[in-house]
Image (tube, rainbow, N blue to C red):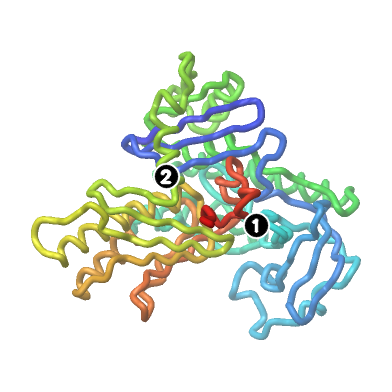
């Protein structure tokens, strides 16, 4: 059972996704500062760096955005030159171009932008210049993939690209065509604004957190969509009434006095999930250490002693840990390189099964995540796309006394 909860306060909007009562995703956005991912800008090239094969583009933010040469070339790999041209042959200072944000400014770094445009809809993602068809890997039946590919080929125009989203499974030609036409009209509006705007200028802003969730997360298997704010609830119902009428009845307003996240045990699960030590059901635990680009997770047996032998105890602890690591990567929205130090196992079969378990669990992650495999030191290496600031930064700040070391000095 999948339940989506939206809590709104004066300054923050928070979302929580529960699957069979277990918290698996958490999102937060400040009221006055929605996410910038997916926004389109008319920018001005400020500087071209041949040594980095990149350019810096002024898009109107405090720091200039970073545009890599690969994001200037044609989005279809088959249409790119065999040898990558120098960035200076493609761009020069003063050039104006439309770009889309793919990674928000993080820390001291500016945003990363691209000219590989993609505009998400309910059923598909429209890529106006990509010239190819993609289908979500989560649609596994060959017959359905072939059907969707045929429908996409029939509705797209020459040079356009589309990606059929997971939600598109089972949808009709009419629904896909309507979605594509809406996105096509939006793209034409963006181009028209680009012609009349002076750089730097924002041309299009993607929908805020609530709108993205209703568009991307709410599916036929969603049991409930619960709001504690009437305006957001009405907006969600209006969108679903137009895009997916069968789901409108699953939206309801929470009107009890007890806070929404307290009523459904979400706050308690959040408090446990964001600790540095996370206990597993058997009595084992994870130790979680996170930096800007690297996350290290250590697995320990803790209180779990098993009932057969040491190897089986270790294996069962690692299986539980694999499930929890996959869940917490989604929940914490971790990005970058992830290293998991599982407890050493003697058999290759057990190591293989742990990798399989991780791969199976991360398939439910909406963010691109990859299990790279075991290193020579016996560590599990993973990567997960990083696009937004860590959600913990909304609620925690570095201690002024220890500067983030988290230790007490004993004289």
Q: Can the viewer see residue 131?
A: yes
Q: Can the viewer see residue 163?
A: no
Residue drawn at (78%, 70%) of the image: 55
Q: 291 or 17, which lies in front?
A: 291
Residue drawn at (56%, 57%) of the image: 405
The x and y percentages for residue 127 are 63, 56
**Considering only vertical position in the picture, is 380 above or below 269?**
below
Q: Residues within 10 Å of mark 2 (few under 14, many from 20)?
A: some
Question: Which quadrant would residue 72 be assigned to in this image?
Answer: bottom right
Q: 294 or 14, which lies in front?
A: 294
Q: 350 or 279, which lies in front?
A: 279
Residue drawn at (76%, 44%) of the image: 189
**Considering only vertical position in the picture, is 225 above or below 55?**
above
Q: 117 or 370, which lies in front?
A: 370
- The residue at which mark 2 appears reads as 273
Looking at the image, tell me whether mark 1 or mark 2 is earlier in sequence order: 1
Viewport quadrant of the C terminus? bottom right
Viewport quadrant of the N terminus? top left
The x and y percentages for residue 227 are 51, 24
- The residue at which mark 1 appears reads as 103
Q: Is 256 displayed left or right of 8 in the figure?
A: left
Residue drawn at (81%, 53%) of the image: 62
The x and y percentages for residue 303 are 23, 52
Under circle 1, the secondary element is strand
Q: Is 108 displayed left or right of 381 in the figure?
A: right
Q: Residues within 10 Å of mark 1 (few under 14, many from 20)?
A: many
Q: Is 407 displayed left or right of 37 in the figure?
A: left
Alpha carbon of mark 1 to alpha carbon of mark 2: how far? 25 Å
Image depth: mark 1 or mark 2 in front? 2
**Considering only vertical position in the picture, is 117 above or below 80?**
above
Under circle 2, the secondary element is helix
């Amino acid at each position: 059972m999948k339940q989506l909860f939206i809590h709104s306060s004066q300054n923050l909007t928070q979302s929580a996704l529960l699957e069979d009562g277990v918290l698996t995703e958490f999102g937060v956005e400040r009221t006055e500062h929605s996410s910038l991912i997916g926004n389109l800008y008319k920018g001005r090239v400020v500087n071209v760096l041949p040594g980095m094969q990149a350019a810096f583009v002024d898009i109107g933010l405090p720091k200039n955005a970073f545009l890599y040469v690969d994001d200037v070339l044609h989005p279809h790999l088959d249409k790119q030159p065999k040898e990558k041209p120098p960035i200076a042959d493609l761009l020069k200072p003063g050039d104006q171009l439309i770009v889309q944000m793919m990674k928000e400014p993080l820390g001291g770094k500016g945003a990363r932008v691209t000219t590989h445009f993609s505009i998400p809809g309910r059923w598909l993602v429209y890529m106006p210049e990509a010239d190819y068809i993609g289908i979500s890997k989560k649609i596994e039946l060959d017959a359905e993939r072939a059907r969707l590919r045929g429908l996409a080929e029939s509705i797209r125009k020459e040079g356009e690209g589309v990606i059929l989203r997971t939600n598109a499974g089972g949808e009709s030609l009419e629904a896909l065509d309507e979605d594509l036409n809406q996105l096509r009209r939006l793209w034409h509006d963006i181009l028209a604004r680009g012609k009349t705007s002076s750089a730097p200028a924002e041309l299009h802003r993607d929908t805020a957190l609530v709108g993205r969730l209703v568009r991307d997360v709410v599916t036929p298997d969603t049991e409930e969509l619960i709001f504690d704010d009437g305006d957001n609830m009405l907006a969600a119902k209006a969108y679903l009434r137009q895009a997916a009428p069968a789901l409108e009845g699953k939206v309801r307003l929470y009107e009890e006095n007890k806070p929404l996240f307290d009523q459904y045990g979400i706050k308690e699960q959040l408090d446990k999930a964001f600790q540095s030590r996370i206990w597993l059901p058997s009595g084992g635990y994870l130790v979680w250490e996170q930096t800007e680009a690297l996350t290290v997770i250590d697995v320990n047996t803790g209180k779990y002693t098993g009932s057969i032998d040491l190897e089986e105890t270790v294996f069962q602890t690692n299986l539980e840990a694999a499930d929890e690591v996959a869940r917490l990567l989604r929940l914490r929205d971790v990005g970058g390189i992830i290293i998991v130090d599982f407890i050493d196992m003697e058999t290759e079969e057990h190591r293989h099964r742990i990798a399989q378990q991780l791969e199976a669990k991360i398939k439910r992650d909406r963010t691109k995540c990859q299990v790279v495999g075991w290193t020579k030191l016996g560590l599990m290496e993973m990567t997960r796309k990083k696009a937004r600031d860590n959600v913990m930064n909304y609620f925690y700040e570095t201690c002024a006394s220890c500067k983030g070391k988290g230790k007490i000095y004993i004289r």
